[in-house]
Image: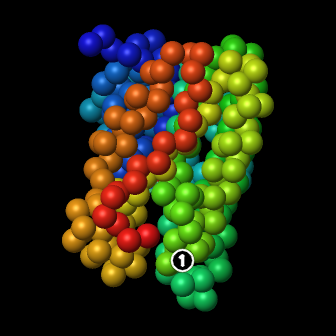
């Protein structure tokens, strides 16, 4: 099969590990040039070196308000255009609400919701001027089902799902598509913060998903004919007790 994203320029946030890394590598395999955005400089530079001209590292702490504001202009200065924007970087706060650290709540809500909204806000005018562009947000299964063991995290993903759905029709008139992928438990560093009993249950029920499987879904979404919206894909383990 020919490279399906040949000639496209993509941006992936949180690209130094987990789902973001799998997404970025899958897009490169499909012929795209990918800007890897992450705060983890060491991992980012080592990863991008492996991909030559196809990977552009951009070390950014998205929780730094000024750096976040400059993200899209910086990327455009470096690579000229953005065809695909994968808003993926996210944090996790699990467990009971009363045990959650207020500062961790702030950081997580900021990254999972505000930063995504601001990045998408900044990229839309560029894409709208070109009358083409795809935006995908990494949401979560928690955005579709109330998961009482992670109320803080679930709230951030419900918020961003609402944002995707409300933005979709507004940008569609300009030829842009926005969608989300909502995985259940994916084998990444983020699972280290999961409540132990839930992780054990996910393992025992065979519910763990590989990041590469999410990347395959993303490629499917991004390669639909342009007249077709990419909607919200939920990756639902069948045996997992939510
Ligand atoms: P991960 O921890 O492996 O990757 C997150 C990446 O984001 C890391 O490379 C990290 O350095 C980067 N990052 C974190 N804070 C940043 C910041 N301030 N600025 C720039 N980069 C930053 O985790 P993951 O599981 O791959 O998470 C990716 C997304 O997937 C998140 O939005 C997460 O909520 C979502 N998600 C994960 C799962 C899961 O089970 N792993 C399930 C559903 C949704």
**Direction from residue 154 to residue 208 in the image, left or right:** left
Q: What residue sits 43% from the left and 35% below the top? A: 218
Q: In the displayed image of the protein, which residue is found farthest to the bottom?
A: 98
Image quadrant assignment for residue 47:
top left
Q: What residue sits 30% from the left and 24% below the top? A: 29
**Direction from residue 221 to residue 46 in the image, left or right:** left
Q: Quadrant of the N terminus?
A: top left
Q: What residue sits 34% from the left and 80% below the top? A: 196
Q: Residues within 10 Å of mark 1 (few under 14, many from 20)?
A: some
Q: What residue sits 52% from the left and 71% below the top? A: 147
Number of callouts: 1
Q: Foreground residue, 178 or 239?
A: 239
Judge whether 134 appears above or below 167 on screen.
above
Judge whether 197 appears above or below 134 on screen.
below
Q: Foreground residue, 133 or 44?
A: 133
Q: What percent of the width, then of the height, locates residue 107?
A: 62, 66
Q: Which residue is labeled 1 in the image?
A: 148
Image quadrant assignment for residue 230:
top right
Q: Foreground residue, 132 or 48?
A: 132
Q: What percent of the width, then of the height, locates residue 175?
A: 68, 18
**Direction from residue 8 to residue 237 in the image, left or right:** left
Judge whether 95 appears above or below 192 on screen.
below
Asked whether residue 51 appears in the rendered view, the answer is yes
Asked whether residue 57 appears in the rendered view, the answer is no
Q: What percent of the width, then of the height, locates residue 228?
A: 57, 21
Q: Foreground residue, 223 or 10?
A: 223
């Amino acid at each position: 099969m020919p490279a399906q994203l040949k000639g496209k320029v993509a941006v992936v946030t949180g690209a130094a590990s987990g789902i973001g890394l799998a997404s970025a590598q899958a897009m490169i395999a499909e012929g795209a040039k990918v800007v890897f955005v992450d705060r983890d400089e060491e991992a980012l530079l080592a990863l991008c070196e492996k991909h030559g001209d196809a990977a552009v590292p951009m070390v950014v702490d998205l929780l730094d308000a000024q750096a976040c504001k400059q993200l899209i202009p910086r990327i455009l200065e470096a690579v000229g255009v953005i065809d695909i924007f994968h808003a993926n970087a996210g944090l996790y706060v699990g467990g009971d609400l009363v045990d959650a650290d207020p500062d961790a709540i702030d950081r997580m809500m900021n990254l999972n919701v505000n930063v995504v909204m601001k990045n998408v806000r900044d990229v839309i005018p560029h894409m709208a001027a070109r009358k083409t562009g795809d935006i995908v947000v990494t949401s979560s299964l928690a955005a579709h089902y109330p998961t009482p063991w992670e109320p803080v995290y679930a709230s951030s993903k419900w918020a961003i799902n609402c944002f995707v759905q409300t933005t979709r029709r507004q940008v569609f008139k300009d030829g842009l598509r926005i969608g989300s992928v909502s995985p259940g438990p994916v084998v990444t560093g983020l699972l280290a913060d999961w409540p132990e009993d839930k992780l054990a249950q996910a393992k025992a029920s065979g519910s763990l998903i590989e990041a590469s499987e999410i990347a395959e879904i993303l490629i499917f979404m991004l390669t639909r004919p342009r007249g077709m919206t990419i909607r919200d894909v939920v990756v639902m383990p069948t045996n997992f007790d939510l």
